[in-house]
Image: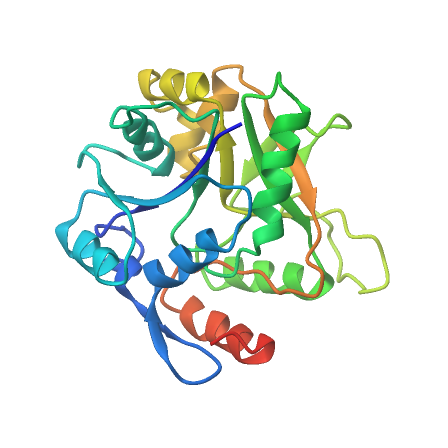
């Protein structure tokens, strides 16, 4: 079963323009661009046939090619990473069986998150879309709530049914807990990891649908699938002591760099 990892990257981000070219310092003090660190994360995944950066921006394309990335140019009209992955399909001579969207703002994504996602798609042939979720620690919930109090649009949470199918995704912290949480209790808040696996047919259908109302309000692309009746399979993954956080805002740079320091990531 062939697997393609696509790393969508755009320059004109509303919250953080030029984000893919922002530099983050690792444990040794070496600075690497966010797109480079995302590329390295993609290349660490086993069982993948190809990793490619998908962009519409010449600055990002030039920077990616400079460190040896495979670059696919996509239209400026792509409004999110899923639409960009769909555009990539139209450039390929041979269609992969699974396309993985590894978002270019999540350099801390461990390889086993993506490997578990691909394995879940293989084990569930009926699944059209799947995404990883990570049970939050009390500290992660506190960080999420702090972002909301400070007015920062940060990480996403996921709520799902007993079969693992998503019920909703939100930039708010769901479910509402209403009290401080302890590290020794089972916490019901799941941090959505911004990675998706799709069947080609689901991607092609997505690009034909109009943006949904919930997608527009939340700013979450995966809600378009749910608003059109496509189930999104949530695959629980384990941190294994590896901290996870995305770069959603400039303030996240320092937080991610501190994790690099703690984990010894260069």
Residue drawn at x 48%, y 58% as measured from the top left: 246
Residue drawn at x 60%, y 44% as measured from the top left: 115
255 over 95 or under it: above or below: below
Q: Is residue 45 left or right of residue 224?
A: right
Q: Is residue 162 left or right of residue 113?
A: right
Q: Is residue 209 left or right of residue 102?
A: left
Q: Position of residue 208 (x, y in %)?
A: 32, 16
Number of numbered labels in the structure image: 0
Q: Position of residue 206 (x, y in %)?
A: 39, 21
251 over 126 or under it: above or below: below
Task: Please say which color scheme the image uses.
Answer: rainbow
From the viewer's side, name the closer residue of 259 and 221: 259
Residue drawn at x 81%, y 64% as measured from the top left: 182
53 over 217 or under it: above or below: below
Q: Position of residue 116 (x, y in %)?
A: 64, 42
Q: Is residue 66 left or right of residue 27?
A: left
**Residue lying furthest left:** 58
Residue 33 is at least partly visible in this image = yes
Task: Using the rendered view, name the quadrant where residue 91 is placed.
Answer: top left
Residue drawn at x 66%, y 37% as measured from the top left: 235
Q: Position of residue 189 (x, y in %)?
A: 70, 48
From the viewer's side, name the closer residue of 122 and 165: 122
**Residue lying furthest right:** 184
Residue 175 is at least partly visible in this image = no
């Amino acid at each position: 079963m062939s697997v393609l990892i696509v790393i969508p990257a755009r320059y004109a981000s509303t919250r953080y323009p030029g984000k893919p070219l922002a530099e983050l310092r690792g444990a040794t003090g070496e600075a690497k661009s966010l797109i480079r660190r995302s590329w390295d994360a993609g290349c660490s995944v086993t069982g993948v046939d190809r990793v490619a950066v998908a962009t519409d921006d010449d600055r990002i394309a030039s920077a990616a090619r400079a460190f040896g990335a495979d670059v696919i140019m996509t239209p400026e009209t792509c409004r999110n990473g899923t639409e960009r992955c769909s555009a990539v399909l139209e450039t390929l001579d041979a269609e992969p069986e699974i396309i993985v969207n590894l978002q270019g703002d999540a350099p801390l994504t461990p390889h086993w998150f993506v490997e578990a996602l691909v394995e879940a798609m293989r084990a569930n042939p009926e699944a059209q879309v799947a995404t990883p979720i990570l049970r939050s620690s009390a500290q992660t919930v506190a960080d999420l709530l702090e972002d909301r109090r400070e007015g920062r649009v940060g990480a996403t949470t996921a709520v799902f049914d007993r079969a693992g199918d998503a019920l909703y995704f939100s930039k708010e912290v769901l479910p509402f807990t209403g009290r401080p949480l302890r590290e020794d209790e089972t916490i019901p808040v799941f941090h959505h990891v911004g990675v998706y696996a799709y069947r080609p047919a689901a991607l092609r259908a997505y690009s034909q649908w109009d943006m949904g109302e919930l997608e527009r309000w939340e700013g979450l692309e995966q809600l378009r699938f749910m608003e059109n009746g496509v189930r999104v399979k949530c695959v629980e993954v384990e941190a294994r002591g590896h901290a996870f956080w995305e770069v959603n805002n400039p303030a996240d740079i320092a937080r991610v760099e501190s994790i690099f320091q703690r984990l010894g990531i260069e």
